[in-house]
Image (cartoon, grey):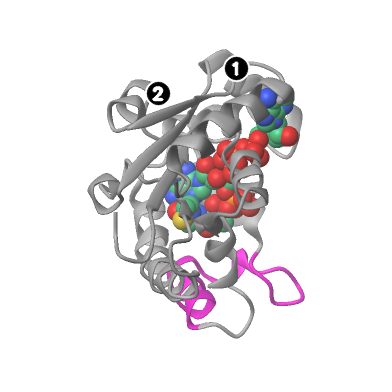
């Protein structure tokens, strides 16, 4: 606990349901700070972040109107023959700006407000110890893969490459103080989030 309120780190594998859980927590009064959202902001046109990405990966990662071509960059950093070096270089550009912006947003929390940081790579980047509580959204691997494919945008190979670039389910669960099971339907998830909120909200 901090004087200001409880700081929660919320993580889970790709397509586990983090954003859905975060939206439900925001509806219940939490301030949500989402690293995926900030990771987009810090590479908007005109930012030093976008300039650094183009410096490293070349103008091929820009769309004709000068925005980041996320699909093209995704293919570069998640291709299954890549060593991971390109992905680490991208993270070295993006993560420091994301953390700085997250700290700014957190400073706007009301006294006592629960702050939920949604961080896909919380475990991978060793941030578990920086929160009062680590909450993991957990899904069975087959459910995760099916939801990821159903969402569209990635083919099977790309989906598997993204899953492989992340911590395993067991590694994530080992860092969890609390687990939100998302194998069921949306009503089940709402019930689990109500139970979670009862445990993390100010009493
Ligand atoms: C490569 C990029 C441009 C692809 O963009 P795209 O729109 O296809 O994906 P998006 O950003 O919406 O991410 C979707 C999901 O992919 C997974 N993912 C994203 N980056 C990474 C990464 N570096 N390692 C492992 N998984 C990742 C996360 O589960 C994330 O929720 C983008 O993912 C990116 O900039 N990644 C590097 C920044 C990063 O590490 N972000 C994650 C948290 S800060
Ligand atoms: N309980 C559920 N039943 C059915 N579909 C679900 C359930 N929970 C989430 N989904 C769907 O699964 C997909 C992934 O959910 P969501 O976007 O919340 O995950 P995420 O962990 O934030 O993903 P990402 O890692 O890509 O940011 C979405 O299409 C969402 O609508």
Q: Is residue 146 above or below residue 18?
A: above
From this viewpoint, is residue 148 visible? Answer: no
Determine the secondary structure under disc 1: loop
Name the residue located 53 percent from the left edge and 39 percent from the top edge: 197
Does 51 lie within the magenta span? Answer: yes
In the rendered structure, the answer to whether residue 8 lies left or right of residue 35 reads left
Q: Name the residue under label 1.
A: 183
Q: Name the residue under label 2.
A: 169
On screen, residue 64 versus residue 121, left or right, reads right
Main secondary structure found in the magenta portion: helix
Residue 74 x/y as whole percent:
57, 50
- Residue 97 appears in which quarter of the rendering? bottom left
Q: How crowded is mark 2: few (under 14 residues within 10 Å), some or many (20 or more)?
A: some
Label 1 or label 2, whichever comes before in sequence order: 2
Residue 41 screen position, x and y as percent: 59, 70
Asked if residue 157 is positioned above or below residue 23 in the image, the reply reads above
* Drawn side of residue 22 relative to residue 149, left or right: left
């Amino acid at each position: 606990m901090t004087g200001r309120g409880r700081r929660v780190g919320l993580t889970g594998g790709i397509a586990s349901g983090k954003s859905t859980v975060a939206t439900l927590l925001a509806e219940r009064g939490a301030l949500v700070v989402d690293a995926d959202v900030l990771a987009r902001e810090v590479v908007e046109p005109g930012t030093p972040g976008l300039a650094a990405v183009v410096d490293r990966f070349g103008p091929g990662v820009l769309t004709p109107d000068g925005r980041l071509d996320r699909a093209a960059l995704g293919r570069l950093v998640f291709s299954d023959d890549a060593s991971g070096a390109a992905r680490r270089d991208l993270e070295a550009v993006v993560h420091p700006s994301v953390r700085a912006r997250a700290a700014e947003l957190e400073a706007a929390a009301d006294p006592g407000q629960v702050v939920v940081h949604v961080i896909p790579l919380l475990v991978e980047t060793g941030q578990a110890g920086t929160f009062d509580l680590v909450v993991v959204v957990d899904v069975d691997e087959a459910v995760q893969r099916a939801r990821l494919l159903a969402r569209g945008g990635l083919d099977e190979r790309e989906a598997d490459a993204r899953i492989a670039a992340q911590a395993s389910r067991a590694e994530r669960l080992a860092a969890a103080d609390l687990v939100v099971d998302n194998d069921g339907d949306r009503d089940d998830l709402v019930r689990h989030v109500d139970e979670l909120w009862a445990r993390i909200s100010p009493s």
